[in-house]
Image (spheres, coloured by chain):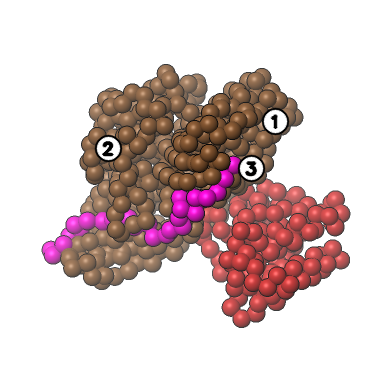
């Protein structure tokens, strides 16, 4: 058996490599994604006071720190047995959606758009955001502007663009000033115009990528997401719902506090990224997907007009079943940007959001608290156990990207089998092996709670697992 | 505009941010100060208002620790959120059609985990701060 190793994997958040194993007749037998970084947040949080956890765990990531702050603060709310005031919840929701907008924009424009614009077989020196800025300056400007808007909302409401400090146990630390509200509302139409242009561009060009749509992690799996009480799209709070590949609801309303009854965490010896699975089906049959694709598959509606209109088109792709093609993560993310802008406008216009009652006080009332929210890349769990003084005794984190680990590995294998010809390995084929990972928009820094380095490597191994070639991708 | 960038949790990598912190009490109002973890394309939108831009950061060098240097050229990178001043300036010129003078003030170090010599580190901060306010 020969092995192809893609190391480092490029245009993702974090450090990973891909190995492609060839069998004795030289065809692709297996392919795996290995996450090769480790930092150990769960361990070094032990002994800290619970109030430090939102700020501490936010440092897991520079792309989606808001998600960690929110899930962490929600876990702390549970420890205190308090419910934050409505203004605080609204502000948390706005900040969370702003992060989804900026993160999805980062994936589409900065990481993935070069593939859409130049094609997967374009010279690798052209497949980057900087080439895009030269040849498609308006598109590049749109990406910069839309992401900056998301960051501006986070900075305005939570203190800082990266690692914001305004979300705290019990609520938030700053009220929403009316001037800030008005200023942000003024900018929403422009951001919406960019989002709709993005959607239009993506849909107009989809026909070019039918082969990728059919082969990029296109298979049956379960899907998991938070939904609201009425089954609508929800990112901040709600119940967990699993559906199968036919669209049947496996569990209608799981309380996130009980996630361990339904989610197991397997460990493979070749990756620091854990492999969560749906317990009732066992490992690895319990593979499920999370993130934008899963959220739109699981939810029955978005609850905002423009997003609901597009959701109909999205759901039509599945012909009555969940959409199984991971290439459509890109489509789902754009719909979520539109939803996020609509929802932020609704929340900003809610008079309650301006209230000065923004924090609920309490002391430690229970010894375990789980905080769960939808991060840009999927469902995020923070699970803390504390002593009576609020000192952290145990931490378990299930990160959005980790939920997708089994599906990402299955996707890498599917693409390698479809595109890798060991006798003639083209750069376009290697790019596709990486691109299937980019569909999931993994944040490996988060998922292993490790240091973020954007890079990758592909290794080719023979049937004895001996490396015969390494393709450095950075 | 003066942009200091780096991560204070990573020891001497936070040099640029420390300089900005010190400058905020010493510079006139028409100089905009920005501190950031790293340079991102979105910064260009703020840079468009500037007549001249100075970047301040820590720069990796194995031999010359705590030396100060100006306009150190680093290897370019195609990473999404770790980009160099030269790339931002090129983008501003090519995409937004605005060209302004810029310079880079760097402290050379190989220590991005801790502050190895506090005295020398803060002396570098003082030197750059003094130079910039003159």
**Image height of A373 relative to B24, above or below:** above
**Can residue A198 be spotted in the picture?**
no
Q: Which residue is mark 2?
A: A279
Q: Nearer the viewer, residue A17 or B19?
A: B19
Judging by colour alone, the chain drawn in red in this rendered image is B
Q: Could you classify mark 1 by the number of other residues whose Cα lies within 10 Å: few (under 14), some (14-19), or many (20 or more)?
A: some
Disc on the earlier residue, 2 or 1: 1
Name, please, the residue furthest toward the left: A25
Q: Which residue is mark 1?
A: A175
Residue A279 occupies quadrant: top left
Disc marking residue B134: none
A471 within the magenta span: no
Asked if badges 2 and 3 are on one and the same chain, I answer: yes
Residue A363 occupies quadrant: top right
Identify the subunit bearing mark 3.
Answer: A
Q: Nearer the viewer, residue B98 or A235?
A: A235
Q: Which residue is mark 3?
A: A165
């Amino acid at each position: 058996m020969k092995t192809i190793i893609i190391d480092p994997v490029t245009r993702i958040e974090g450090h990973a490599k891909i190995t492609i194993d060839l069998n004795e007749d030289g065809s692709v037998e297996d392919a795996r994604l290995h996450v090769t970084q480790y930092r150990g947040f769960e361990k070094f949080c032990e002994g800290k006071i619970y109030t430090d956890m939102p700020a501490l765990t936010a440092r897991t990531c520079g792309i989606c720190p808001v998600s960690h702050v929110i899930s962490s603060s929600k876990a702390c709310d549970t420890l205190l047995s308090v419910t934050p005031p409505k203004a605080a919840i609204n502000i948390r929701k706005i900040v969370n959606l702003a992060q989804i907008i900026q993160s999805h924009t980062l994936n589409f424009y900065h990481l993935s758009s070069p593939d859409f614009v130049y094609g997967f077989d374009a010279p690798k020196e052209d497949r980057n955001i900087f080439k895009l800025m030269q040849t498609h300056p308006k598109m590049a400007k749109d990406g910069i502007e839309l992401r900056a808007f998301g960051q501006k909302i986070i900075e305005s409401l939570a203190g800082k663009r990266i690692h914001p400090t305004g979300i705290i146990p019990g609520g938030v630390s700053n009220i929403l000033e009316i001037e800030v509200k008005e200023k942000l509302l003024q900018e929403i139409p422009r951001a919406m115009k960019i989002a709709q242009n993005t959607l239009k561009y993506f849909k107009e060009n989809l026909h070019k990528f039918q082969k990728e749509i059919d082969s990029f992690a296109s298979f049956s799996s379960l899907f998991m997401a938070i939904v609201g009480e009425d089954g609508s799209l929800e990112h901040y709070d709600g119940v967990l719902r699993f559906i199968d590949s036919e669209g049947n609801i496996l569990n209608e309303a799981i309380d996130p506090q009980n996630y361990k009854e339904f989610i197991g965490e397997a460990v493979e010896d070749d990756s620091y990224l854990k492999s969560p699975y749906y317990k009732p089906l066992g490992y690895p049959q319990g593979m499920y997907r999370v993130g934008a694709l899963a959220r739109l598959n699981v939810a029955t509606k978005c609850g905002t007009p423009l997003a609901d209109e597009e959701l109909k088109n999205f759901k039509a792709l599945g012909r009555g079943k969940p959409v199984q093609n991971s290439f459509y993560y890109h489509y789902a993310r754009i719909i979520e940007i539109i939803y996020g802008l609509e929802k932020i406008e609704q929340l900003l216009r809610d008079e309650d959001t301006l209230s000065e009652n923004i924090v609920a006080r309490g002391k430690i009332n229970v010894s375990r608290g789980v905080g769960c929210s939808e991060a840009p890349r999927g469902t995020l769990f923070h699970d803390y156990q504390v002593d009576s003084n609020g000192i952290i005794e145990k931490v378990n984190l299930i990160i959005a990207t980790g939920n997708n680990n089994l599906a990402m590995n299955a996707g890498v294998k599917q693409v390698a089998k479809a595109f890798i010809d060991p006798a003639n390995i083209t750069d376009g084929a290697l790019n596709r092996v990486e691109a299937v990972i980019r569909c999931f928009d993994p944040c490996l820094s988060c998922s292993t709670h490790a240091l973020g380095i954007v890079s990758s490597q592909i290794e080719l191994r023979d049937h004895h697992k001996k490396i015969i070639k390494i393709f450095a991708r950075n | 505009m003066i942009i200091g960038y780096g991560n204070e949790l990573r020891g001497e990598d936070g040099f640029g941010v420390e300089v900005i912190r010190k400058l905020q009490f010493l510079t006139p109002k028409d100089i905009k100060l920005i501190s950031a973890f790293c340079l991102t394309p979105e910064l260009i939108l703020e840079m468009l208002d500037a007549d001249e831009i100075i970047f301040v950061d820590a720069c990796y060098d194995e031999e010359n620790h705590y030396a100060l240097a100006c306009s150190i050229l680093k290897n370019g990178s195609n990473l999404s959120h770790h980009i160099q001043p030269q790339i931002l300036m090129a983008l501003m010129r090519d995409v937004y059609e605005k060209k302004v003078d810029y310079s880079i003030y760097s402290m050379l170090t190989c220590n991005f985990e801790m502050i190895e010599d506090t005295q020398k580190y803060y002396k570098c901060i003082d030197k750059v701060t003094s130079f910039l306010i003159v």
